[in-house]
Amino acid sequence: MSELKDQLKALQELLKKQAGKRQLIVLHAFPDPDAIASAYAFQLICNQYEIESDIVYAGEISHQQNIALVKLLGIEMVKFGEGFQIDQYDFAVFLDTQGVNAEPITSLVDDKLPICVVIDHHEPQDRISAEFTDIAPAGSVSTKLTTYIEAGLLNMSHESKSHQIAATALMHGIISDTRNFLAADEKDFHAAGFLSQFADTETLRQIQTQARSKQTMEIIHEALGNRVTVEGYSIAGVGYLRPGDRDAVPQSADFLLTEANMHTAIVYGIVRGSDNSETLVGSMRTSKIVLDPDEFIKDVFGKDKEGEFYGGGKAGAGAFKIPIGFLSGEQDEAFQASKWQLYDKQIKNKIFAKIGVQPVK
């Protein structure tokens, strides 16, 4: 409890120093409910100190529930792009990310803005540093923000529409990142109990019951058809994806994990950007308690030339992102097929080597 009080005091003092300034709230490239909810709640907290803020991300909001979350709750976000005016901000805040999966915003912030706050629930990545940090494994950043709010950082009111929105979003963030409380601990349950006093349950129901798109269903079908199962692992490549379909990868991993006798699912594909750049993205889900996704992914895929890991994770889930590099770009169908076969085989061989089975021939 004393640690929480010290953290709360340090954050309050920092925000008081930034009163009247303008901040940039940075999320990872493909913001999930936890990131979006945390950003909105932090924005409300900062409003008390007359700190103006914009929430920015560099990728896409594509998951059906994420789109519904933003639209139904009216959460305003800015997509980073060419001509982004970073000079209008005085400092930056990173939520649910430590900068590695927020490029190219992170590199721009490195050159232009001091970083005042980093709050994340993944393992430390040593990419950025800040005046105030709360980086420690937890169920969600939404849980961390709710703990701060309950401790007095924001005086919640049943009459406030914005507080209702924050509570609804944070509740969805906790539910989402703890996989419907299957990976939740005491702090997550306590935070959800506190939020339940203020959340709009009907709006929460609408967000969580969004149907999957036809394209997402087709990608899940592709993963199901391509999966290789061995030693309790289900591994599947789904080929080339549009940026807007990236969230079908973790949804496919979630689906494969429901198969009997499977404790871990890994799904991956190549996302082609509008500039013809290509990135191999993947998601890992596991129900095996002794399996650490963060350690697994870092061991399998290693680091880039700057020494940054290609991925990481938390309890029960992980993700990886590997730039294709000079092989990116549209070619004829035969070249594309050969390129996919090469990457598909290499990913599988690295995973098989980690779990100690024979590689793909």
Image (cartoon, rainbow, N blue to C red):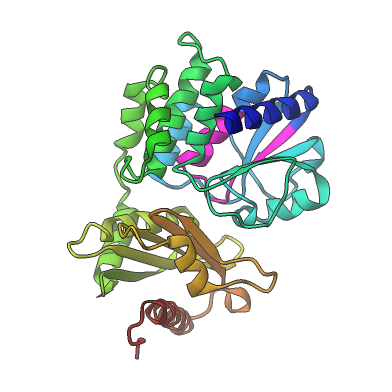
Residue at the extreme top: 159
Seen at 44% across and 77% down, the residue is: 347
Q: Quadrant of residue 5?
A: top right
Seen at 63% across and 78% down, the residue is: 326
Seen at 36% across and 66% down, the residue is: 266
Start and end of the magenta stretch?
23-42
Seen at 60% across and 22% down, the residue is: 153
Viewer-proximal residue among 123 and 97: 123
The picture places residue 53, in percent across and down from the top left corner, at 69, 30
In the image, is residue 102 above or below residue 185? below
Left or right, residue 185 beside residue 34:
left
Q: Is residue 40 magenta?
A: yes
In the image, is residue 143 above or below residue 121? above
Q: Quadrant of residue 255?
A: bottom left
Does residue 154 appear anywhere in the picture? yes
Viewer-proximal residue among 122 and 240: 122
The picture places residue 198, in percent across and down from the top left corner, at 42, 17
Q: Quadrant of the C terminus?
A: bottom left
Q: Is residue 313 magenta?
A: no
Residue at the extreme front: 2
The picture places residue 196, in percent across and down from the top left corner, at 37, 22
Residue at the extreme bottom: 361
The picture places residue 331, in percent across and down from the top left corner, at 53, 79
Viewer-proximal residue among 68 and 148: 148
